Amino acid sequence: MPVHIQSFRLLLIALAAVAAILVTALIRRIAIPRASKLLFLIALILFALAAGGFEYRRAEPATVSVMVDLSASTRGASYRDRATLNRRIAQLLGRTPHQIIFFSDGTLSSIAGDTLADLPSDRTGFRPFPADAIILFSDGQFDLPAAAPPVFPIIDTQLEHPPDAAIVDIQSYPDAQVLITLANQGSARLVTLSGGTPTTLPVAPGHTSVVAKTTTQSASITARLPPSDLWPENDSLTFAPPPLPARERWWVSESRPPSTAFRSFAPNDLPSDPAAYLLPSAIILDDVPADGFSTTQLQRLEQYVRDLGGGIAILGGRSAFAAGGYPGTSLDALSPLASHPPTPTTRWIILTDSSGSMNSPASTNSTRLEVATSAVAALIPSLPPDDDVSLGSFARDLRWWIESRPARSLISTQIVPSEIHPTGPTNLSAVLEQIAASGKSSPTPTELILITDAEAQIPNAIQLAEDLKSAHTRIHLLAIREVDSANLVRQLITQTGGTYLAQADPKLWAGSLRQLFRSASPPRLMTEPVTPTFTGPLASLTPQSVNRWNLTWSKPNVTILATTPYRNHPTPMIALWNLGQGKSLSAAYHPDSAILAALVDQISLPPHDPGFKISWNTTSTLHITIDAQDNNTSLNDLEIRLIPSLGTPHSGALSRVGEGGGEDLDAMLHIPQSAPGRYELTIPAPRIPTLFTLTHKNQIIDRRSIPGRYPAEFDHIGNNIPNLNELARRTGGRVIRPTETTPLHLAGTTRRIPLTSTLSITAAILIAAALLRLRRG
């Protein structure tokens, strides 16, 4: 029946009131015209019906959303063929109106093509569309929604037993054994283990584990299945074995190590794989220049100390500290001894030729002037940070870019004005006269570096040379072409005691400018014999005479381990400091074997604390469990932290580890206590191979390399029938089997139209009409 009463109780009360009114009117025999009586009676009945909450209900057809899962885990589903999908929808819905929604983690309302391609996502997200019912084509590999209309999951036969094989986990055990866990839903396959001794092993169908042997020196190990299914993403995992109980000591140098206790590397052979740095307890850099390493290798050394808690020792010599180009590099940041003094000693002026000849192309996209100014900008971090620096260009006139600023203030500064354009002749003579005049008023020696082709007239060369020498100014020339020795500019260089360097290849100007700067700098490699005096933990060592050493200065907050008097001042020779999680030591000379052994002992990593028992479990999540005890007594309220560090800068690393964490997590994760003496943490597994360090009170208690996991989308392939059954049960739908081909009977919505207002207004109108009729009668 389309008309319904909301409250029979109120209706009965209202009808009783109407009856009472009628009985009263009959007893008192109220004189009212018949027409008015009829209108009053109808109005009272209408008011009674309004009080009962009469409403009109109209059935409307069901609105249906067909949601089609196109996440990667559903590859191979029969509904990925559009014609098959349309036939199945027609079987189940007939002529019922519907809309089709494609989804993975997001949604699309339309996709072109006869074959439905993947909608990329790391994890399927099912977010029900508003509708009376949802027809769902999916494997059910998602988290169930909090609420949804009735859902009717459609089972796809092609996803019942997909022939996928996946490497679930890879772990190492004592005696160089590797345990590989696999899930194989197809036929027998082979798994290949690379890294160390290559091994190929058979993999039977089902959930299995295989054990393989590998070499103890492997920095990383990869288990890989041959590509033979639709989901290659889960066919491999790479990890680094845990550190060996007896850690290595690395000797990085062009010379041989002092003993067989060291593993030797040439600088350019130092590993780039971050997992390799789990092996050494100490790394010794013996008289190596900064440019002997790649940028990646320098990053690994800094990461080894700061993040992995490693120890590094930097030894002096001909190619170390200032002589080795350390300023402005990671080696200078690691060293507790500075290559430059903490007070200004030199006034630096660097001028670039901006005459018309510098407008010629140096490469496809740059002029000679642009390459020269880039070389100047690259030199800035190498300058002594407290020295006075002036930068400019010259053609007809001298134009200053920067005047008299400390070098440290220029590192993040735009030093070249944007409107500099090469034009005009070279008027170098006037420029040098101006420099000489300004140098006479400066008590600090001036080193003038010119980048030019030296095609300039110097009419007053003899007097200019005298003026420059009296102003304590030397000229150093980076010639962008070979310049004859008779050239007046070259003669000025000789007369002022400067340096000449020619480099015609613009690609090499930056390196040549650094070389010229080192030649112009005060000597830092000393040959005066000195005898360092040891202090602190090295006080018991016997002093030794040193004939070659680097002049260095101590940085703030370092521990001085050896000094020597030089020019009536104590000069640091060995210093140590804590840097991040590790230690860094610098010696301004090459020590003998006995002293070297003592230095290595100062920085080597200690063995693991036996009071902490640690387990690492990795699937789609990383779960860490720590049991802390001391003589069978639980250790509570400890501050234990997990520090991720990767082979990439930190800002990109943690966002993959902590689901959007990055630097917002302060590069650290606190591990909460879950029981007496037990601490546990679960986070999403990292997407790229990650080195993790566990610390307690800034002391390292464990380090581990965790494999880079594939997205959670590939953890499970095939229909998740229990999940689909639970979804249907929760929402009031049901699971549709492949054998069901008859149309579904889906209940639509009922539109409810309340009649209370209509009845009340009609009754009021009838009462008004009755009163009007009564008045006229």
Image (cartoon, helix red, strand yellow):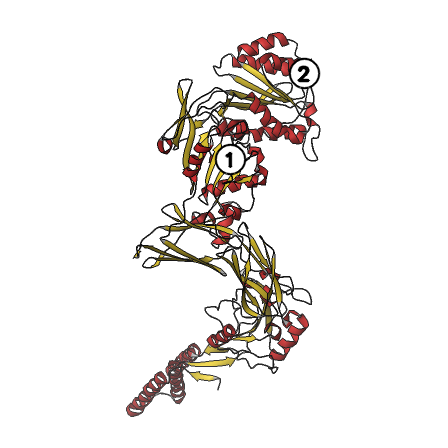
User: Where's residue 436, x and y in %?
Assistant: 56, 13
Against 42, residue 155 (above or below) is above
Picture coordinates of residue 584, whole percent (x, y): 44, 37
The answer for how far apart the CA atoms under marks 1 and 2 are is 54 Å
Residue corresponding to mark 1: 258
Disc with the residue nearer the chain's start (1 vs 2)? 1
Which amino acid is tagged 1? Pro
Is residue 257 found left or right of 530 in the rendered image? right
Task: For the residues labelled 1 and 2, say whether their Cβ atoms are less than 8 Å apart.
Answer: no
Most foreground residue, 770 or 94:
94
Residue closest to the far front: 260
Mark 2: secondary structure: loop
Residue count near mark 2 (Cα–Cα under 10 Å), binned few <14, some 14–19, many ≥20:
some
In which quadrant will I find the C terminus? Answer: bottom left
Residue 328 in the figure: left or right of residue 110: left
**Residue 115 picture quarter:** bottom right
Q: Name which residue lies at 56% across and 21% down.
A: 520
Disc assigned to residue 456: 2
Q: Which mark is residue 151?
A: none
Seen at 66% across and 9% down, the residue is 459
Query: In the picture shown, does residue 298 fall above or below 451?
Result: below
